[in-house]
Image (cartoon, helix red, strand yellow):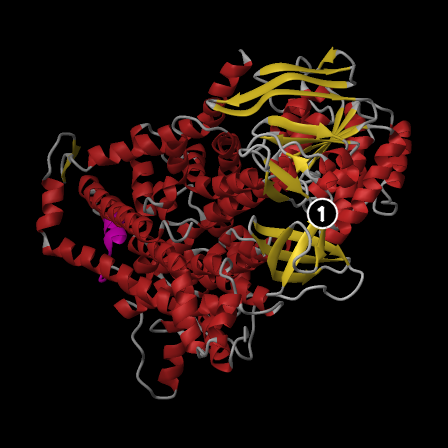
Amino acid sequence: MGFLQLTSLSKRFGTFTAVEDFNLDIEKGEFVSLLGPSGCGKTTTLQMIAGFLEPTAGRITVEGEDLVAIPSAKRNIGIVFQSYALFPHLTVAQNIAFGLEMRGITAMERSQRIARAIDIVHLKGFEARFPKQLSGGQQQRVALARAIVIEPRILLLDEPMSNLDAKLREDMQLELRQIQQELGITTLLVTHDQHEAMALSDRIAVMQGGRIVQIGAPYEIYENPSSRFVSTFLGKSNLLPDPAQMARQISLRPEKTRLVPAGQGKLQGRVTACIFFGAHWLYQVDTDHGLLLAYEQNLGAARARNGETVGIDWDEAHLRHLEGQE
Amino acid sequence: MNQNGPFALIFHALFILFMIAPLAVVVWVSFTPLGYIDAPTTDWSLRWYREIWNSSGFIQSFWLSLGLAFAAATLSLVAAVPAALAIARYDFHGRGFLTAMFLSPLMIPSVVLGIAFLRFMTAISITGTFYGMVLCHAVFVMPFVLRLTLASVTGMDRQAENAAISLGASNMTTFRRVTFPMILPGMVGGWVLAFITSFDELTVSVFIASPSLTTLPVRLFNHITQTTTPIVASVSAVIIFLSLAVILILERLYGLDRLLVGTKR
Amino acid sequence: MTPALYRRTAPYWLSLPGFVLFAVMLFVPLVMTLLLSFYSFDYTAGIQTGFSWHNYADVVSDDYFHEIFWRTFRYGLIVTLFCIVIGVPEAYILNRMRAPWRTISLVAIIGPLLISVVVRTLGWVILMGNNGLVNTGLERIGLAKIPFIYTETGVIVALIHVMIPFMIISVWAVLQKVDPATENAAASLGASQPKVFFRVVVPQVIPGILSGSLIVFSLTTSAFATPAIIGGRRLKVASTTIYDEFLNTLEWPLGAAIAIILLLGIMAVILGWNRLIERRYAQVFQ
């Protein structure tokens, strides 16, 4: 039985169903991501766990204890908000102290725990600063410290990196993963960023239209997307018709293809774009099955030019049969 | 490209001169030693400042205006803060009407407000009372308080409240420790603006003032319409100095543009 | 109280203090003033209650009042026009200034808003009055005095001084949202500086000009201190007339009728103007 269990969870706003029959089990210490486009219900799910929204139906339990009956102030859940939601009138140390004060923890223990939290997020020397005096990355560290210092049962991360620039985001992801594993804290991340979800999670739950459409370890989902939606939302995918069943499609990852001389390979086409990405080349090839993408590792100069006719080849083992149209 | 040319700078300098000149001459003339309006060049004197001290009327009016502005701005704030919370946070029947009502004194000519207050106060026999004047002033400074308070309530990150709750704070604690401090700057800004508006106000006060309760602008106005002795200049100069002090403090604390224009830099 | 009921009624409880204040101190007085305008006045008997349109008939039929209302309206138009012509370029210049000049200029331009109108008008009396600094100086060097006090020009100049900060504020607020790159774009396409200003900047700040104009017009037509001090009894406007009816001749009902006409006139302009702005600009500037 899972540590955090969401059972048949639903949320309706009037006639609109945001989350429907949502089931998820999270093990203690596990890092799970809810990944999906905006409006897929992932934030609504997070808010129900946090207690800011009441589920229309279903159960949320932690170690078997029903969470829905507990007011959010008593749930002992740490949250890192998208906007960080730092208290602008309080210093870094006071922000982190807030949750401890609410728990009536003595000043002595408080200062020890604050010092430890500040140490964990590498913010030594910033204790007396106000949020306005910090950079975006530093603000995010404060938000994280404030959430973990209360030693919450669960840590919820609501698009925590979306306000950071790309370079900083990568660094923070590494750090966040380390902190999470060190503390062994059960974590649920809500994000629309596939890279973030893959980099951080033990498991990813891909959401669409208020439901989980696929759940599993990042590699597992990436390699075996169950539907067209998953195959295109998580990474890029070439969609080919399934010769066995007309209504179905086959997914072929661009990096699993090879460019071969014209006349060879399984498909023929004309190169319409050739883009250099550093680590690899991207070719766009116009074939009978539409525009296909092919990645080639950067082992030398471009293998084909615009307008050139080439063949595309792949191993049958890399083809993935998708369920249904979507 | 995005720099002012010489022509623009000359225009700007002339405009600043136009804005400053009438105020500068008031201050200049206030230092004359003579008994009539004159700009001192060699002989400077504080005679007309001593004169303010000797004429108890102006001093009395100054304290009255100060007390009135303080009470009216405070009363207005007390009414405006909960109203701003209601307007910003709830979608309820009559919300648009309430907002329009609280802002309506901006649209009604002051002279109409003045006679309406006079008519009402005469009818219930509260003319010439300090409390009556406070109520009247509280009404027409309300838009200033409400606008700034409303802006700070709507502008505040509501996630901060959720954050406080998730950290274990009760609703009351959340308001006291998070919401209130976060909207405090807007409240203070609105209060100060209301205070100044009330302190400076002439048109409404001219109707509701009585001989024993004459606000400073009204006394000054009555003086100016009768004679123009340099004492009006020295009183005005004092008002300018005080206003300037407030202006500089506001600029330091909030930025005048944020307070009056409502935009961020 | 259940949480649901609490949530439903909370906004009403919260706005109750303000509502009561306004109902008692604004709504009731305004209705009483409206009623007052239908009463009649007799020099021996005082104010007589009743209902009659004769105060309105007096105002509508008398050339004396026509002239007063026409002057009030004319001031509003001329002052608004000058505030646009001077205020728009000035807001533009101000927006392009750098610190610390920007702050200094801002204090000089917007600061006076926080200084009593009486004081600001007195400045004009001291500067331009018959015995003011300019005219005394002119007299000393043997030149003719410039008439200012008790002239319409004088009232208008002083009113522009009082009102123009509002125009600058409105235009500036909009200017802050204008992407400065649009000017560079226009210049890169070959537009001269004046062309950039008139073809690219001004069209983008029209909403600010419109709202500024509305504020300036309604405040000018209801202005009291400046027309009273500089215009005096000879150049009466609506508000100074109301003042005289109430505090000198004590003809309250007539004064109330003039006030109601002024109020309705200004309301009509505000509502009509808003309608115009909404129709013309609502879709473009959201």
The one of A83 and A274 positioned closer to us in this rendering: A274
Q: Is residue C241 magenta?
A: yes
Quadrant of the rendered structure where residue B136 is? Answer: top left
Q: Position of residue C55 (x, y in %)?
A: 13, 42
Question: In the rendered image, which residue does mark 1 sit on?
Answer: A314
Look at the picture and state if A235 lies above or below B239. above
Q: In the rendered view, does B123 fall on the left or right side of A29?
A: left
Kindly tell me whether residue C280 is visible in this rendering: yes
- Residue type, mark 1 in image: Trp
User: Looking at the image, which residue is at 83% across and 43% down?
Assistant: A174
The one of C108 and B55 positioned closer to us in this rendering: C108
Q: In the rendered view, does B40 fall on the left or right side of C217?
A: right
The span picked out in magenta is: C234-244
Magenta stretch, main secondary structure, is helix
The one of A14 and B60 positioned closer to us in this rendering: A14
Q: In the rendered view, does A151 fall on the left or right side of C102?
A: right
The one of A217 and A297 positioned closer to us in this rendering: A297
Chain under numbered label 1? A
Q: Position of residue B43 (x, y in %)?
A: 55, 76
